[in-house]
């Protein structure tokens, strides 16, 4: 349990921690709530955003970039939008 909290507060998303530890996201969120851990969303550092820009420009998908940094694809998408990037056309109508 201590490991789960440590991973989460280090910046990994709840989904990434749950996957790494082999538990459900809801079970992890319940544990975090019981332990009084703030559920603020993980954010990318400026260096990570710079890297995300390069990866996105090279063709990597938002979900792949998010997985690399332990954040959601929406976190990556928002960081790229703040840098002025428009979303690429999705795969089958949906960006993953």
Image (tube, helix red, strand yellow):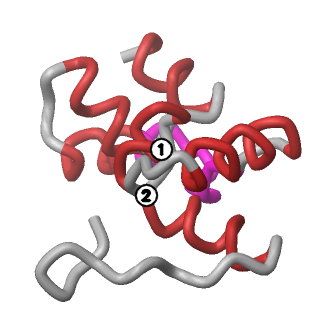
- Quadrant in which the N terminus appears: top left
Region of the chain picked out in magenta, as a range: 32-43
Report which quarter residue 76 is drawn in.
bottom right
Picture coordinates of residue 29, whole percent (x, y): 34, 49
Q: Nearer the viewer, residue 65 or 28?
A: 65
Residue at position x 61%, y 83% in the image: 86
Q: Which residue is mark 1?
A: 65
- Tag 2 near tag 1, CB within 8 Å: yes
Query: In what element is the residue under mark 1?
Result: helix
- Determine whether, in the image, residue 25 is placed left or right of residue 87: left
Residue at position x 45%, y 78% in the image: 88
Q: Which residue is mark 2?
A: 62
Picture coordinates of residue 3, whole percent (x, y): 44, 11
The numbered dot on residue 73 is none
- Determine whether, in the image, residue 9 is placed left or right of residue 94: right
Q: Is residue 41 magenta?
A: yes
């Amino acid at each position: 349990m201590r490991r789960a909290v440590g991973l989460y507060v280090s910046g990994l998303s709840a989904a990434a921690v749950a996957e790494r530890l082999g538990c459900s996201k809801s079970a992890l969120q319940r544990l975090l709530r019981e332990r009084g851990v703030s559920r603020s969303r993980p954010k990318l550092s400026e260096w990570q955003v710079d890297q995300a820009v390069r990866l996105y420009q090279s063709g990597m998908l938002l979900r792949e970039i998010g997985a690399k940094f332990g954040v959601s694809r929406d976190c990556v998408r928002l960081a790229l939008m703040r840098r002025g990037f428009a979303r690429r056309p999705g795969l089958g109508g949906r960006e993953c």
